Image (spheres, rainbow, N blue to C red):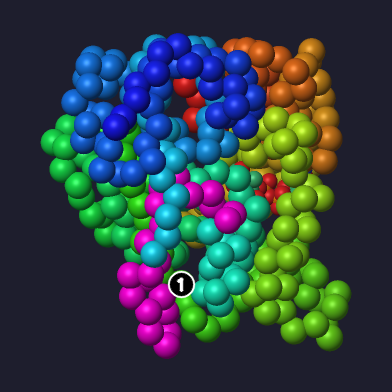
Amino acid sequence: MIKILENVSLKDKNTFAVDCRAKYFTEVLNEYQIPEILETNAFQSSKRFILGGGSNTLFAKDFEGIVVHLANRSIRIVESNKKFVLLEVDAGMNWHKFVEISLNNKYYGLENLALIPGTIGGAITQNIGAYGVEVKEFVHEVRGIDTTSGEFLVLSNDDCKFGYRTSIFKTELRGRFIITSGIFKLSRKPNVNLSYPELKKLVQKFPFIKPDPKYVFDQVCKIRSSKLPDIEKLPNAGSFFKNPVVNGETLEIIKQKFDDVPSFELGEGKYKIPAGWLIEKVGWKGKRVGNVGTYERHALVIINYGVNSGREILNFARMIQNEVYETFGIHLDFEVEVIE
Ligand code: EPU
């Protein structure tokens, strides 16, 4: 049986903890409920939003449509051999829980992605990444339902068109496809990735420690907890902006004024510059306007210090965009999905 609720508060369903409402709201505990949801008037006649953990979404106003909340949470082995395992994980399962379960069962690869808030569906949709690893490296297939035809479909990794914090689910299939589960291919053999500068530094500092996946997992948890605010105490949605990509000419112009600008070469004359650094340089690290501010230890994270309306957070983010644009001529794109 499905239930379509009306005028539901989403305050405890978004990590910014903004007090917005959904005109209609329904929770999916089992993927076989979805065809019934698709038939309802509420679904047929209004805007749709598929919600996972709400850890990358800013509701700037009430949602005048239906919010479909994925809360299916099981996990099963599809195939297992000496080299790898294929695990099917439901879209509503908590991402970090899955990372822990896989490590405890000696299925490796996800260590660098520890402690990222959100669900499996969200992780796939925005191709989460951290410490030199992106989830797309482990996604074998994605299962879901096309809401237009009502058909269950299986998409291959290539079909998903993954990019930096994006996929087909954020572009062509936005609002049209509901991910029901992801099939992940994890290694039975440990193979740690220490390419990210902060992890590399740690290994050089303690050369007598041989880093295994558990060690990497622990270090990633430690680094994240020291740099990023706890969503339970300081409501936020992780990085608010994407790291911009610029050409060599723009980078040179910045270097002439600020010779300490960090950059990562992407090839084809393109460079990624950390948005956190740009925001810090314009003096907005730890800055507050009323009850919204950037985190004092990481300028890329915007914190809700007590506003009820997402609009105030959006206005604050726009002020940052303007400041960075005026100083550097660089437009910062939102990483967080803004619903307005
Ligand atoms: N930096 C500053 N000031 C700041 C923050 C950062 O100068 O206030 C500089 C740092 O010194 C460093 C560089 O910026 O040289 C990069 O910082 P960091 O390693 O913290 O990574 P990031 O590029 O800011 C990205 C992801 C994070 C992910 C980290 C670690 C994006 C938009 N963000 O942040 O992802 O955890 O790398 O891999 O790509 C998220 O997506 O929500 C998220 C937290």
Q: Residues within 10 Å of mark 1 (few under 14, many from 20)?
A: many
Q: Quadrant of the N terminus?
A: top left
Q: Can residue 250 be seen by looking at this rendering?
A: no
Query: Eyeballing the image, is 239 above or below 104?
Result: above
Query: What kind of residue is marked 1?
Result: Leu
Residue 186 lies, in percent from the top left, at: 46, 72
Residue 263 lies, in percent from the top left, at: 66, 52
Q: Can residue 217 be seen by looking at this rendering?
A: yes
Residue 210: name its quadrant.
Answer: bottom right
- Name the residue rendered at 36%, 52% in the picture: 181
Query: Eyeballing the image, is 115 above or below 333?
Result: below
Residue 125: name its quadrant.
Answer: top left
Front-most of residues 287 and 272: 287
Q: Which residues are magenta?
A: 77-97
Front-most of residues 169 and 283: 169
Residue 29 lies, in percent from the top left, at: 38, 41
- Name the residue rendered at 59%, 70% in the picture: 103
Q: Is residue 221 magenta?
A: no
Identify the residue position indicated by label 1 in the image.
186
